[in-house]
Every structure is written in C-alpha cells, then in structure tokens.
Image (cartoon, helix red, strand yellow):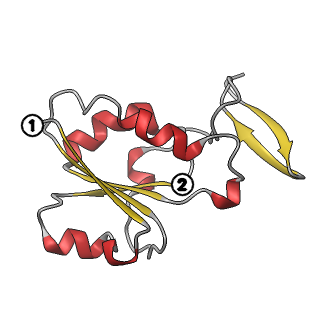
Amino acid sequence: KQWYQRRVRGVASTFDPTGNYHWCPEKKFEEVDLKDHELNNHIVICAFGDDKPPISGLSSLVKPLRASNLPYKKLKVVLLLAEKEFLMKAWKELRHFPKIRVLCGSALDRRKLKRAFVNRASMVVILSNY
C-alpha cells in the first residue's frame, strides 16, 4: 500500500506512506493540463530550464505546500509553467501531489502569463537552472 487515510479535523484525508504530505493516486501528465480552468489565489511556479535533468528541488518546493498539517481545503492550486520537455521530466516526482496543474510554454510569453492568471495568483515563483 503506497498511501493511507486518516481523519484530520474531522475530514478524511489521504497521505503518502510517511504521513507527511497530502497524496493522490497518480495522475497522468495530460490530465493536469490547465486547459480551460480559471484559477484564483493560486501559486504559479515559472521554471526556466531545458530537457536536461529538472531543477533540483522542484519537488522540495512543492512538498511544504502539500504538508499533512495543512487541511486539504486550504491547499492552493500550484501551476507549473515551463517548457513541455522540462515539465514531463519533473512530473515523475510530482504526479502524486494533489491540486497540481501544468501549463506548457515559456514564462517569457505574455500570453502564457495571462493564461496562468498571474494577476490573480497569491504568489509567483521564478526558478532557473541557468
């Protein structure tokens, strides 16, 4: 068994085997595309990289945002904005975290930033391995 459930403040939640992080069944990369969703009060992570190994620590950045001491309802959507090849490699470490969305493209593209609703985000993080 790769996960377990427990009640936190009266609400059943699913966690990873360590009990430290909110967990969900594996989601395929295609399932988490932003598509037509509108976001508000979310966290945008703009990552600049290439198809080489992803920025180390991307999952380390997301883990505290999915900590088990946070009620599930208080988890903010995390939107990852980066080139598709980069996101696909990083997805291997992120596929079990809930409320993650991806938007393929460059954070230098104003249309992508608008599509990411950065004007409505509670936080925007810029990461680069250059």
Marks 1 and 2, how far apart at CA? 28 Å
Amino acid at circle 2: Lys
- Whether residue 9 sits left or right of residue 108 in the image: it is right
Which residue is located at x 69 percent, y 54 percent?
Answer: 72
Which residue is located at x 71 percent, y 43 percent?
Answer: 69
Which residue is located at x 45 percent, y 38 percent?
Answer: 94
The residue that disc 2 covers is 99
The residue that disc 1 covers is 130
Q: Is residue 71 or residue 106 the one in the foreground?
A: 71
Q: Is residue 4 above or below residue 108?
A: above
The answer, for residue 103, to whether it is visible in the render is yes
The residue at the far right in this view is 10
- Asked if the residues shown at circle 1 and circle 2 are in contact, with their CB atoms under 8 angstroms apart, the answer is no
Q: Is residue 79 above or below residue 2?
A: below
Across and down, in percent, residue 71 comes to 72, 53
- Whether residue 104 sits left or right of residue 79 in the image: it is left
The kind of secondary structure element at disc 1 is loop
Across and down, in percent, residue 58 comes to 35, 37
Amino acid at circle 1: Tyr
Mark 1 vs mark 2: in front:
1
